[in-house]
Image (cartoon, rainbow, N blue to C red):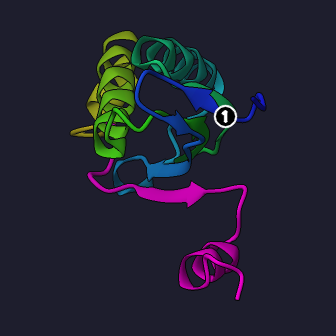
Amino acid sequence: MSERYKRNNGCVYDVKYHLVWCSKYRRKVLVNQVESRLKELLYIKSQQLGIQIEAIEIMPEHVHVFITGTPMVAIQHIVNQLKGYSSRILRLEFKELRTRLPTLWSRSYYVGTVGHISEETIKRYIIDPKGK
């Protein structure tokens, strides 16, 4: 089986997500030591969750993370865990994050699924499975 696919007892899967979330009020607080510590924390939490970070980019006011997930864990749970864990630790370690913001992250986030097979190919396969 290709290394692209993962498997467990019940399924074979290739689940990838592009996640984006912003700091509260889009404040530019994700810089210098906060940026590097945030990367460390996201890698730590991703290992605990059993997901793999494929790519990460931290901008001063938002975060992009590309992950390989699992179909057994809802994406909402993954995002909430990454945001909650990183916020709690960063706010403990960096006092300026507690004094400048009521919370580190905004409530919302963006998630996009990423696949190897195009949407058009899947539609064609479903509509015409016998290759008529």
Looking at the image, which residue is at 65% across and 25% down? Answer: 32
Q: Residue furthest right?
A: 2
Residue 8 spot, x, y in % from top left:
47, 22
**Quarter holding the N terminus?**
top right
Is residue 21 placed above or below 128 in the rendered structure? Answer: above
Q: Residues within 10 Å of mark 1 (few under 14, many from 20)?
A: few
What amino acid is labelled 1 in the image? Tyr
Q: Residue at x 51, y 49 (%)?
A: 19
- The quadrant holding residue 39 is top right
Q: Residue furthest left?
A: 102
Quickly name the residue at label 1: 5
Residue at image position (60%, 41%) is: 14
Viewer-nearest residue: 41 or 74: 74
Q: How far across and down, in percent of the image, does residue 67 sit?
A: 58, 37
The quarter of the rendered structure image containing the C terminus is bottom right
Task: Describe the element under mark 1 as helix, strand or loop.
Answer: loop
In the image: residue 19, left or right of residue 35: left
Residue 128, magenta (yes or no):
yes
Residue 103 in magenta stretch: no
Point out residue 117 in the picture as x, y percentages from the top left corner.
71, 62
Query: For this rendering, which residue is in front, 41 or 55?
Result: 55
Q: Position of residue 44 (x, y in %)?
A: 50, 11
Q: Give left or right: position of 18 versus 23.
A: right
Residue 86 falls in which quadrant of the image?
Answer: top left
Depth check, front residue: 53 or 118: 118
Determine whether 100 is above or below 128 in the image: above
Q: Which residues are magenta?
A: 104-132
Q: Determine the residue located farthest toward the bottom in the rendered image.
A: 132
